[in-house]
């Protein structure tokens, strides 16, 4: 793995965490929306991540990325495979005076747990910060390599 690939890996991580932060903010923004129908109620959304592996196979089928015998090829970044809706139960509340109540007097609230979303937000923010620090460290290392010949 070259030092320059660190920028691609960290960049893909930052992009993935940005998507994660966007879905978290959407979940928090819709945490108090109500509906009279289960089908129309907002459901929490979560991104699905996958590791991107390098496709460095030579035409004869042997791997060129493995420098040492028996070494497993490392990942080359992360990608967002998609965003899925949480299928857990919605929260029905008996509020017959609510304008959005159905015939039985129930209002359906989203399956968003604001406390969990805030914890996820902190985790995503820290992961984003870590990727920024990785890029800064790689940049400093490259700058120091350039000054070795002086």
Image: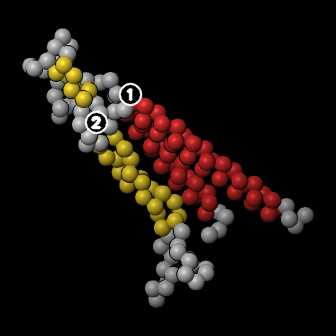
Q: Which mark is residue 141?
A: none
Query: x%, y% of residue 107?
Result: 20, 22
Q: In the shown orientation, is residue 101 left or right of residue 57?
A: left
Do residues under tags 2 and 1 come within 8 Å of each other at their CB atoms?
A: no
Q: Could you tell me which quadrant the N terminus lies in?
A: bottom right
Q: Residue furthest top?
A: 97
Query: Which of the two residues, 11 or 32, is positioned nearer the viewer here?
Result: 32
Q: CA distance from mark 2 to mark 1?
A: 12 Å
Query: x%, y% of residue 31?
Result: 34, 27
Disc 1 is placed on an element classified as: helix
Residue at the spot of label 1: 29
Residue 41 lies in what quarter of the image? top left
Q: Residues within 10 Å of mark 2 (few under 14, many from 20)?
A: many
Residue at 52% x, 42% y is 123
Q: Is residue 105 above or below residue 87?
A: above
Residue at 24% x, 33% y is 90
Residue at 56% x, 53% y is 11
Q: Residues within 10 Å of mark 1 (few under 14, many from 20)?
A: few
Residue at 65% x, 68% y is 2
Residue at the spot of label 2: 43
């Amino acid at each position: 793995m070259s030092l320059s690939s660190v920028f691609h890996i960290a960049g893909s991580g930052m992009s993935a965490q940005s998507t994660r932060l966007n879905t978290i903010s959407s979940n928090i923004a819709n945490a108090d929306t109500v509906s009279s129908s289960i089908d129309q109620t907002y459901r929490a959304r979560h991104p699905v991540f996958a590791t991107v592996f390098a496709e460095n196979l030579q035409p004869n089928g042997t791997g060129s990325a493995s420098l040492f015998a028996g070494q497993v090829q490392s990942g080359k970044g992360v990608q967002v495979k998609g965003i899925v809706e949480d299928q857990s139960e919605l929260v029905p509340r008996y509020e017959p005076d609510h304008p959005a109540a159905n015939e039985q007097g129930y209002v359906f609230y989203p399956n968003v747990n604001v406390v969990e979303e805030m914890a996820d937000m902190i985790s995503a923010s820290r992961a984003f910060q870590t990727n920024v620090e990785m890029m800064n460290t790689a940049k400093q290392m490259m700058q120091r390599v350039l000054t070795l010949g002086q």
